[in-house]
Image (tube, rainbow, N blue to C red):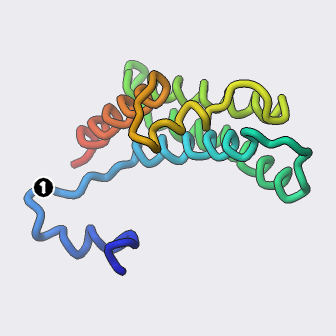
């Protein structure tokens, strides 16, 4: 059963046995949080053929409110103005956030960020989710370079 659950103490338990230090994935985690929020907003609205109930309105409102601050926190990771990795990833996140917000404003109509990413669940790569994969690899490299 323990193999199905995340091992929250993995770092502490395995640190001495690993030949390299554990990667502190600051940028990758921040990217995933923002992109996850964008995808949650989109998924909640995709294919919705009715008006939102009060709980959905509160939930979407909360996630949308947090989005701006989360994106700003991600941009603040830039070490310099010419940090291309964070700048490129932030641009992708801003576009994703705008798509999600547009979907909210259109009550679920229009292009769906969630639908763009869904093929990845079937191990199918398209232009949208391919870009996501490349950015996550670049961010992992950024995290590795930033680690002590």
Q: At x 74% / y 32%, what residue is drawn?
A: 101
Q: At x 41% / y 34%, what residue is drawn?
A: 124
Q: Residue furthest bottom?
A: 1
Q: Quadrant of residue 73?
A: top right
Q: Is residue 114 left or right of residue 17?
A: right
Q: Measured from the top left, where is residue 145 in percent x and y? A: 24, 38
Q: Measured from the top left, where is residue 25 in percent x and y? A: 35, 49
Q: Measured from the top left, where is residue 126 in percent x and y? A: 45, 25
Figure check: 133 above or below 81: below
Q: At x 73% / y 43%, what residue is drawn?
A: 64
Q: Is residue 61 left or right of residue 8?
A: right
Q: Quadrant of residue 105?
A: top right
Q: Quadrant of the N terminus?
A: bottom left
Q: At x 46% / y 28%, what residue is drawn?
A: 89
Q: Nearer the viewer, residue 107 or 115?
A: 115
Name the residue carrying label 1: 20
Q: Nearer the viewer, residue 135 or 5?
A: 5
Q: Is residue 94 left or right of residue 84?
A: right
């Amino acid at each position: 059963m323990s193999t199905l659950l995340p091992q929250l103490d993995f770092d502490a338990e395995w640190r001495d046995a690993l030949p390299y230090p554990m990667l502190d994935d600051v940028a990758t985690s921040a990217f995933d949080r923002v992109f996850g929020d964008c995808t949650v907003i989109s998924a909640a609205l995709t294919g919705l053929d009715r008006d939102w109930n009060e709980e959905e309105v509160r939930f979407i409102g909360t996630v949308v409110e947090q989005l701006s601050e989360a994106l700003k926190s991600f941009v603040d990771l830039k070490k310099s103005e010419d940090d291309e990795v964070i700048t490129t990833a932030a641009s992708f996140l801003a576009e994703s956030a705008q798509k999600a917000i547009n979907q909210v404003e259109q009550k679920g109509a229009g292009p769906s960020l969630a639908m763009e990413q869904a093929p990845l669940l079937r191990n199918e790569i398209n232009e949208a989710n391919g870009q996501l994969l490349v950015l996550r690899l670049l961010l992992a490299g950024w995290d590795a370079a930033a680690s002590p």
